[in-house]
Each structure stands twice: as structure tokens, then as C-alpha cells.
Amino acid sequence: MNCRGCGTPLVLPLIDLGTSPPSNAYLRADQLEQAEAWVPLKVAVCQTCWLVQTEDYTRADTLFDADYAYFSSFSSTWLAHAEHYVAQMIERFGLDSSSRVVEVAANDGYLLQYVAGRGIPCLGVEPTRSTAQAARGKGLEIRELFFGRDTALQLREEGWAADLMAANNVLAHVPDINDFLRGFATLLKPTGVATFEFPHLLALMAGHQFDTLYHEHYSYLSLTAVQTLCERNGLEVFDVGGLPTHGGSLRVFVQRADGERRDVLPVVRQVLDAELAAGVKTAAFYATLAPAAERIKHDLLRFLLQAKAEGKRVVGYGAAAKGNTLLNYAGVRPDLLAWVADANPHKQGKFLPGSRIPVVSPERIAVEQPDYVLVLPWNLLQEVSQQQAQVREWGGRFVVAVPELTVL
């Protein structure tokens, strides 16, 4: 396979997580007798542009389809993050009723609802029918399309040249990342700004976050790689900031390279230097993840087997993509993890891909009073432990597996 960014043959492996179904391919009860599509989950590193990427085995239109089950609005943490982002962008860039805001991967309108609420014209681009319909239910204008240069040209002709384009946790989800970025260079006004948020590769490596690797994530991003990609596609990075979301993310601000350019802030060079010092341009930097994943797998299995031997009941919370990577890599099945609770009604009544663990309503936790609740989306541990505080009333405890098994 050649690099998605620059075309160089990929020869440096990061990790091989075996085979698994796509992590958001939840099963209905009537599908349990059918075979699932198990495909390899391998990640490699380009030693020319240092883009980390999954090897090609799945197409985007099979991953982000009409039944896509990830709805952003079911996380109160994420809603608060979106509302704060909108307030910051309005203040910093002087957005008002004469502005145009476009969000790519608008999902269920979790972010644009706050833009519309401030009286600013906005448009969402969202290819998954399930979430697009939810966004329209909030009164938002949504185009059910994949984004790239052709879509950008179409929207520009329709009067949607943008003052601000938001793209939260989508840059990693696109197979043709060059075409995707060219779309931003096409749709932005000469004075416009686009922001990309994505989990930071440095945080992934430092926190052994191998469970954030799954088929829907085509790329794993450093500022080093993103800056190179932007330069190749008519964009310039002028600011960057760190975020606590998803275990450690970056928010990158870009502008058109041929537009009315803002000064590039010193923090851009500071982050690039920090990545260089950490070793992102060395093969040794990438050698630590696979053994860490193996250790995490063994620790989780040891805990689950011991709990079962002691007659303890373990359930999960959060039918998240990262949880599916972890459970399938470790080979966990319902005999070790009885069920997983999730607040998203679109997932309740279904079964996790691969492991086929049933997904239930969080109300089940109080009814059955398990001994342990394994929080699969560990980045939402604080939110989950607060929402499910009653677990401690019967002596139950919360557990996370990444970056190391911890019983709280």
C-alpha cells in the first residue's frame, strides 16, 4: 500500500490488531445468525510525510452509511465542548448574521444548533442519513454528502462560501485526505478560517491508546503530518491549541494560502518542535505501542477471568468504537462481559460488532447492581462516573483498561 498523503510505499508497521468487523457496525437481533465482515486492522507509518494510517481494507460508504449509530449529542461533555467552541469562534472572528458557517461532518447538529441559536446562517455537510435526519429535526440545513473539492464547488456556487468551517474529529475519517483538504481551500472565503480537531498522535502514543485505532479512522495525526498535508492542498496552518477531548487532541486553525493571510503564531513552531523532540520522525517512536497493547489485553483478560472465578458480575458502559477495538482484540465475549449500557437509544437493543455483547439502557445498571462497571470510553470516565454515581451505593466500582487497568 502507498501513503494516502504523499504516495510513498508504506514499509514501517505500527501495530497489527488482527481482524474485526467495522467498529460501528452494530447488529440487530435478526442479524445474529449472519456472518459478519471481519477485516484486517493494521496500521502503518509513512516515513516520508509521517502520516500514520490504517491499511486499505474498507470503503467509506460501507462505514458511514444510513445506519451509522454514533450520535454526538448523547455526550453532555461533547455538547458543552461544542457550545464553548461556538462562543469562542464568534468572539475571535467577529461572526454575525452576515457570516456563513459550514460544518463538515455535522453529525446530529450537536454544534450547529449553537451557531443557529446565535442567528448566524449555517450549513451542515453530513453523509450518514441517520444523523442527518436528527440534525434536520433541530431545524438545521443539512446536505447529505461526502465532502471534497466537488462538493465544495457545488456549495460555493450555491452561495455558501464560508467565513468559518468547522471539522471536528473528521479529518482522520476520510480516505482521500488530499481531496478533502482541497475542498476547504475551495469553499473558504479569502478571509475565511477553518478549524480541525483531531486526537493528537503524541497523546495516542504516550497513553497507549491503541483502542482509538479502528477502520473508520483512516489516519492518526500529528501537526507535522497535518501541516504537510495542508501545504500540499492550498492551506496554511496559523494557530494550534491543545484540547483535553478524546484523551488529548489538537485544534488546528488554517487559512487559504492564497488568501488574506494572518500571521503564523509562534505556538505552531513550538508544537512542531515538541513533536520532533518526541521522535515522530523516527522509527523508534512507533515501536512502543504494540507491546503496550499486548500488556493491556492480558491485564484486562486477567481481571475479567478473576472476577468470574470469584462470582463477581462485570458489565460495560459505553458502546463506543474504541471499546469494540479493545474487546475484539482481547477476544472478550458475553461470558466475561454480560452487557454494555449506552445512553444512545439507536444502539440499545443491538449487539456489539464481533463480540456480540448486547447493548442495553443505562437503567439496567441500577436494576442488576453489578460489582464492576468497565467504562469503555475512558475519555468520558468523569461524566459516566457522575451520571452513574449510584454504583458506589451498593459497593460497585468503576474500571478502565487504558492506559493501564485501574479499579476506581
Image: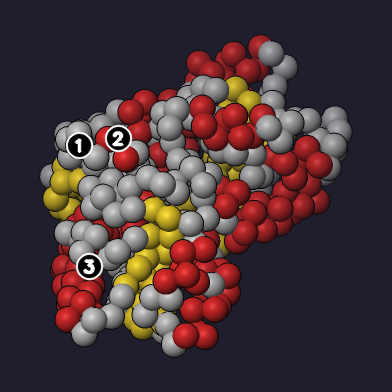
Q: How is the image coloured?
A: secondary structure
Question: Foreground residue, 31 or 227?
Answer: 31
Q: Which residue is mark 3?
A: 336
Is disc 2 placed on a helix, strand or loop? helix
Please indicate, yes or no, whether residue 219 appears anywhere in the rendered image: no
Residue type pointed to by label 1: Glu
Residue type pointed to by label 2: Asp
Q: Nearer the viewer, mark 3 or mark 2?
A: 2
Q: Earlier in the sequence, mark 3 or mark 1?
A: 1
Is disc 3 placed on a helix, strand or loop? loop
**79 relative to 370, above or below:** above
Q: Which residue is mark 1?
A: 33
Q: Position of residue 76 (x, y in %)?
A: 62, 59
The C terminus lies in quadrant: bottom left
Checking the image for residue 371, the label placed there is none
Is disc 1 placed on a helix, strand or loop? loop
Residue depicted at x 23% and y 81%? 311
* Mark 1 crowdedness (10 Å alpha carbons): few <14, some 14-19, many ≥20: few
Residues at marks 1 and 2 touching, judged by CB atoms closer than 8 Å: yes
Residue depicted at x 35% and y 68%? 315
Please indicate, yes or no, whether residue 372 appears anywhere in the rendered image: yes
Checking the image for residue 30, the label placed there is 2
